[in-house]
Amino acid sequence: MEFGMFVSWVVVGLLAGSLAGIVMKDGGYGLIGDLGLGLAGSVVGGWIFRALGGAAGGGLFPTVVVAFVGAVIVIVAQRKVWTHA
């Protein structure tokens, strides 16, 4: 993977985490926590998408959607496992 692609995935993951933090009200983990979960979610979303037979590519918008879905999945799973005060 080239450096530019890596940077774009990090930016997409951060954007997805920010969007997921806004959408997933009640129990956010702050900006840094939501962004971290978004980064993890972008990886999870990409993995799930590829496992279901999705093709890579398609531009920025589909990539953000896949990362956003992954971020929401990670946030929901994280909330089920670990609650904070």
Image: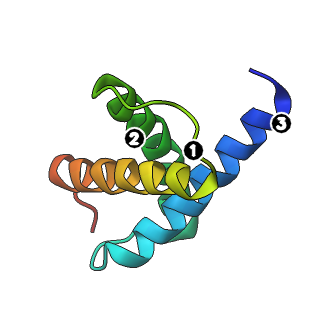
The numbered dot on residue 4 is 3
Instruction: Give the left or right position of residue 79, taking residue 9 as reference.
Output: left
What is the distance, in whole Å, between disc 3 and disc 2 at their CAs?
20 Å
Per the image, label 1 sits on a secondary structure element best described as: loop
Would you say the residues marked 3 and 1 are in contact, meaning their CB atoms lie under 8 Å apart? no
**What type is the residue that disc 1 sits on?**
Gly
Position in image of residue 13 (x %, y %): 57, 50
Q: Is residue 29 above or below residue 26?
A: above
- Taking the view exactly as shown, the residue that stands out farthest to the left is 80
Is tag 2's residue or tag 1's residue first in the polypeptide sequence? 2
Per the image, label 3 sits on a secondary structure element best described as: helix
**What type is the residue that disc 2 sits on?**
Gly
What is the distance, in whole Å, between disc 3 and disc 1 at their CAs?
17 Å
Residue at the (33%, 57%) spot, across then down = 72
What crowding class fits label 2: few (fewer than 14 Cα within 10 Å), some (14-19), or many (20 or more)? many
**What type is the residue that disc 3 sits on?**
Gly
